Image (tube, grey):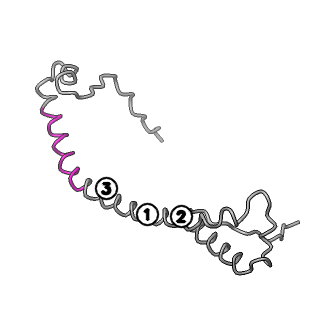
Amino acid sequence: MANNRPRVVLPDTPADELKLMGAIYQKHQTLGNASPLQYLEDINWADHGPKIATAQSLQGEIEELEKTLESLYRQRDLILGPLRQLLKASRDVIMGIFRSNPKKAGEVWGLTVNDTPRPPKPTAPKA
């Protein structure tokens, strides 16, 4: 037998949760003593409702910082592109100099040299 009982889906992001909490708290305040939420005992809107504004303010700061962070990542990545090419080219030159002793390249230049043999590539079965 199908379960036809309605479900209330709560938001899954802090920003959306705070928006819903703000709406519920405002409705609770509007209803005053007629609000059914006044009967909550263990945790109540009178104690915690005012904290919503603080949390919303912090959420706004977080969103601004995330925008700033995204911009910083983009700026960094633009710089990193050529630097990565330079790093790879430098590695190739250093490894050419220390071709007979790659471990020495690691000791002198700080490169991590992995000299363990690579496992063989799997071959496709013949049909």
Task: Write down the region rendered in magenta.
Answer: 78-93
Q: Which residue is mark 2?
A: 54
Residue 74, disc: none
Q: Are marks 1 and 3 in contact (CB under 8 Å)?
A: no
Circle 1 crowding by C-alpha within 10 Å: few under 14, some 14–19, many from 20: few
Q: Which residue is mark 1?
A: 61
Q: Nearer the viewer, mark 1 or mark 3?
A: 1
Would residue 28 be counted in the magenta stretch? no
Distance, label 3 to label 2, CA atoms, is 28 Å
> Residue 108's spot in the image, x, y percent?
17, 23
Tell me the kind of residue under disc 1: Glu
30 to 101, vertically: above or below: below
Task: Report the number of discs.
Answer: 3
Task: Name the residue at 69% across, 67% down.
Answer: 9
Q: Which residue is mark 3?
A: 73
Tell me the kind of residue under disc 2: Thr
